[in-house]
């Protein structure tokens, strides 16, 4: 599933491509969107702003209309010039938004809804989101408080809980825990204040480092372009994720992994570098 940095880059790229432009054509195979288009009309509206909040993207049109999308596991937005061939099949197209110069296409998007500002606040999945780690006004101290308010959760599960902070996915979960020296299966109640602060700070640092001007606007749904180690070797970009059995880049101990949480998302860690205290399940 695309993580917060992926959606942020996609929103930034779309903003640069179609922001402040009028829609000249709108197509969709999704009946609910088509109904709104029929009733209210999308053509002629201006794309005022495109932004990301955690793993959600919001496309604001003039006249108080917002397209809310979530990529889930396989969704993506592409940008094309008029007449340029698509990289994915037309059968995968869910939404196509044309302006005079650019065509933006959403492929395989599972969640897509139109909202107004008032109805957006009642959208179940979106309204419960915690603060975005990529927001300009992100408050680290408040986020630490939100984390520690869920003492019963395992740390790895807590980092993926979007109502605590939004934007962390499975890759960054493991990387943040490693960089913080915290075992992902520890319970939040076992964290010292310094550890809780370090987890939030590292989560913010890693996501922001992957949306800098030099990180580009490539819509990444895999790990190849992510970096947490700051090493120049492309094959050494991550500390522990997907490295089960390989040597830790710090101490040489074999990386371990285990499925975690109700969604059985795999966590990776170094048994030497990460604190084993208060581990709640056998690893």
Image (tube, helix red, strand yellow):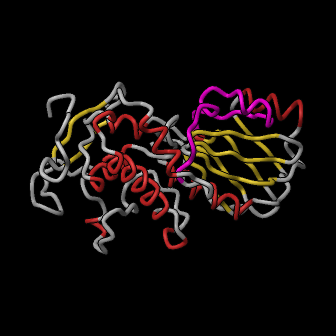
Identify the residue at the far front of this view.
193
265 to 24, vertically: above or below: above
40 horizontally vs 95: left or right: right
Would residue 121 be visible to someone looking at this image? yes
At 58% from the left edge and 39% from the top edge, which residue is drawn? 70
Asked whether 21 or 237 is in front, the reply is 237
Q: Quadrant of residue 28?
A: top right
Give the residues in magenta.
109-133
Quarter of the figure with the N terminus: top left
At 37% from the left edge and 43% from the top edge, which residue is drawn? 170
At 73% from the left edge and 33% from the top edge, which residue is drawn? 120
Identify the residue at the far left of this view.
253
Q: Quadrant of residue 65?
A: top right
Residue 203, image x, y percentages: 42, 53
Asked whether 76 or 267 is in front, the reply is 267
Total residue callouts: 0
Would residue 108 be visible to someone looking at this image? no
The answer to whether residue 207 is magenta is no
188 horizontally vs 86: left or right: left
Residue 2, image x, y percentages: 47, 46
172 horizontally vs 133: left or right: left
Quarter of the figure with the C terminus: top left
Residue 136, image x, y percentages: 62, 58
The answer to whether residue 112 is magenta is yes
Residue 127, image x, y percentages: 64, 32
């Amino acid at each position: 599933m695309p993580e917060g940095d992926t959606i942020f880059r996609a929103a930034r790229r779309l903003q640069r491509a179609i922001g402040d432009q009028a829609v000249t054509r709108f197509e969709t195979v999704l009946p609910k969107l088509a109904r709104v288009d029929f009733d209210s009309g999308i053509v002629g509206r201006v794309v005022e702003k495109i932004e990301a909040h955690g793993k959600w993207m919001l496309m604001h049109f003039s006249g108080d209309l917002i397209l809310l999308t979530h990529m889930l596991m396989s969704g993506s937005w592409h940008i094309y010039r008029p007449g340029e061939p698509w990289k994915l099949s037309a059968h995968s197209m869910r939404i196509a938004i044309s302006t005079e110069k650019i065509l933006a296409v959403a492929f395989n998007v599972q969640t897509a809804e139109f909202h107004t500002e008032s109805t957006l606040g009642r959208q179940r999945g979106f309204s419960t989101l915690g603060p975005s780690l990529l927001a300009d006004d992100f408050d680290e101290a408040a986020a630490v408080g939100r984390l520690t308010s869920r003492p019963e959760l395992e740390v790895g599960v807590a980092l993926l809980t979007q109502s605590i902070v939004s934007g962390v996915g499975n890759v960054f979960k493991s990387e943040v825990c490693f960089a913080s020296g915290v075992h992902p299966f520890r319970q939040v109640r076992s964290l010292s204040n310094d550890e809780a602060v370090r987890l939030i700070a590292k989560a913010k640092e890693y996501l922001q480092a992957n949306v800098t001007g030099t990180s580009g606007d490539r819509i990444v749904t895999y790990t190849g372009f992510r970096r947490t180690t700051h090493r120049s070797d492309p094959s050494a970009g991550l500390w522990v994720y997907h490295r089960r059995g390989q040597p830790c880049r710090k101490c040489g101990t074999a990386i371990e992994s285990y499925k975690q949480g109700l969604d059985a998302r795999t966590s990776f860690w170094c048994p030497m570098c990460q604190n084993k205290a208060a581990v709640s399940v056998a690893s």
